[in-house]
Amino acid sequence: MAENRIRFSATLIERGFSMGLMEETLKEQLGQIIIKEAKGEPKKADIDRGVILKILAFLSPSLLLVLWEIFARLGIVDVRLFSSPVMIFNTMIPMLYSGELLYHTLISVQRIILGFLAGAVPGVILGLSMGLFAPVRACLMPMVSATFPIPKLAIMPLILIVFGLGEASKIFTIAIGVFYLVLINTMAGVLNIDDIYLDVAKNFGASPFQFYTTVAFPGALPMIFAGFKLGMGTALLLIVAAELSAAKAGVGWMIWRAYDMFDIEKMFVALITLAFLGYIFSYLLEIAEKVVIPWQSNRR
Amino acid sequence: MNPTEAITIEKLTKIFYTRQKEVVAIENIDMTVREGEFLCIVGPSGCGKTTLLRILAGLEKQSYGKVIIRAKNPEKPLTSMVFQGESVFPWMTVQENVAYSLRIRGIPKNERLKIASHYLRLMGLEGFANAFPHQLSGGMKQRINVARAFVSDPEILLMDEPFGALDEQNRLLLQQELLKIWEGSGKTSIFITHSIDEALVLADRIMVMTAHPGRVKAIVPVDIPRPRDILALRSSPAFGALFNQIWQLLQEEVLKAKSMELKT
């Protein structure tokens, strides 16, 4: 009886009731009562931790830059090969002011966007068809499987012969790289759609076109975007290769030009621009994904 | 065909062929569904209830036999199905899901949202019109599922264990709501369930199926007047007697299904 009362009191205390005197006597009778009480304060500690992590994320690359500069000045790092942050910065500023950097960047951006669209649009359409219709898949899959593993750089000479030295060959090189990744992801996205959704569409009498618009396309969208992101990575890779041959401008051309002139600083400026472009493009895709796939935003 | 019959099924057989063997899902089913009737089908798991419904919905083709469906209004869709499990499109809002059949039929947006909103209100979903399904509970999703089928206004409503995955409380609520909306519509309906309780609450007649392969074992009329009140009904003596009768029929088949499972 007495024990029951003590247990009851103990739960009351655990739940945060203040029992003053009762608490004292309980501790005397039983040595093992554990009291867990929260007063509601750790919020501030969590915030502090978040701020510290952000500072760390900013500090570590900054520290690396500072070390690079110091080692360059001390002669530990060979500035003829690796330059130094200040030297790169000093090269970059005039290029920014003269518009030279912007000019080359915009030319590359244009090629990337056109190539991306030229690859992604047919990739999505064919991928949806191959995912939805088994005969289409049976016809096209062998060709896709056979040609997909060929490195895109290996067919660049062929592309140059077919499309000439102008813009078309550069755009096509990027398009072909993007095409395969989008196609394969889109098809996988459609194949992953639960059969029950196809049954629902069939049940309500959806036409083949309505299968595309109401089930296959929205159902595959998350995978389509995964394909877009992979495709964008490949596009950045291929732009440098495409601008190696027969180009007169572009970020990739800047790199090869700098190589010819042994202008290490300019080369680094181009590399930084590429990194920046990659960041911007993936950021834009991220935003587009949130807008286009609102039903996924809360799941993660 | 008798004019009071909405569906006549004659010698319906479905065989699934796999590489190793043939599986007879349903065999020689003969039955009729009357105009405006609510027919429940109960039977042990794997007895081909879903196959029968999928044949009626046109999602599967029978191997032998005949299905005759009488359409009063050729403008209306013949059947609509409420599927078992998660079948609400995750990429559409609640409202778009409910109005889906109207979109397929090319009805303009304003009009279809107006029709949908009526059923959203009936199923207690009006506050969630613009929510996405992943934000909702299982009970809410099944409400969408039911509303979607009713919106299409079919000649015949097919429901494949729509409340099977729900907890007891939600199941009772949804049964009540379904009764209300169905009694208002008077639609010929076929409803598959595992639960004898549920069948008794909803049905005009209950068809008991045999274990694998599925045949018609018995058809039991449920002479409980409508409109029905679930609570009063469940405590009535007629309910208990019918429950026993159906359980007797079903028990044999469930045991048979079990012993077959042991053999294979």
Image (cartoon, coloured by chain):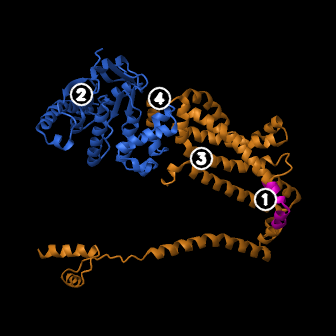
Chain colours: A orange, B blue
Q: Disc 2 to disc 3, how far (Cα)?
A: 48 Å
Q: Disc 1 to disc 2, how far (Cα)?
A: 76 Å
Q: Disc 4 to disc 1, how far (Cα)?
A: 55 Å
According to the picture, the residue beneath numbered tag 2 turns out to be B207
- Label placed on residue A225: 3
> Label 1: chain?
A
- Choose the circle earlier in sequence order: 3 or 4: 4
- Choose the circle earlier in sequence order: 4 or 1: 4
- Estimate the x, y position of residue A60 in percent, counting from the top left: 64, 71
Identity of the residue drawn at 52% across and 75% down:
A48
- Choose the circle earlier in sequence order: 1 or 3: 3
Q: Disc 4 to disc 2, how far (Cα)?
A: 28 Å
Q: Disc 1 to disc 3, how far (Cα)?
A: 28 Å
- Estimate the x, y position of residue B205 in percent, counting from the top left: 22, 28
Mark 2 residue crowding within 10 angstroms, few (<14) / some (14–19) / many (20+):
many
Identity of the residue drawn at 71% across and 59% down:
A276
Q: Are marks 4 and 1 on the same chain?
A: yes
> Label 4: chain?
A
Does A220 sit left or right of B236 as displayed? right
Mark 1 residue crowding within 10 angstroms, few (<14) / some (14–19) / many (20+):
many
- Estimate the x, y position of residue B251 in percent, counting from the top left: 18, 33
The disc labelled 1 sits on which kind of residue? Answer: Ala
Q: Are marks 1 and 3 on the same chain?
A: yes
Mark 4 residue crowding within 10 angstroms, few (<14) / some (14–19) / many (20+):
some
Range of magenta residues: A91-105
Q: Is residue A95 magenta?
A: yes
Chief secondary structure of the magenta portion: helix
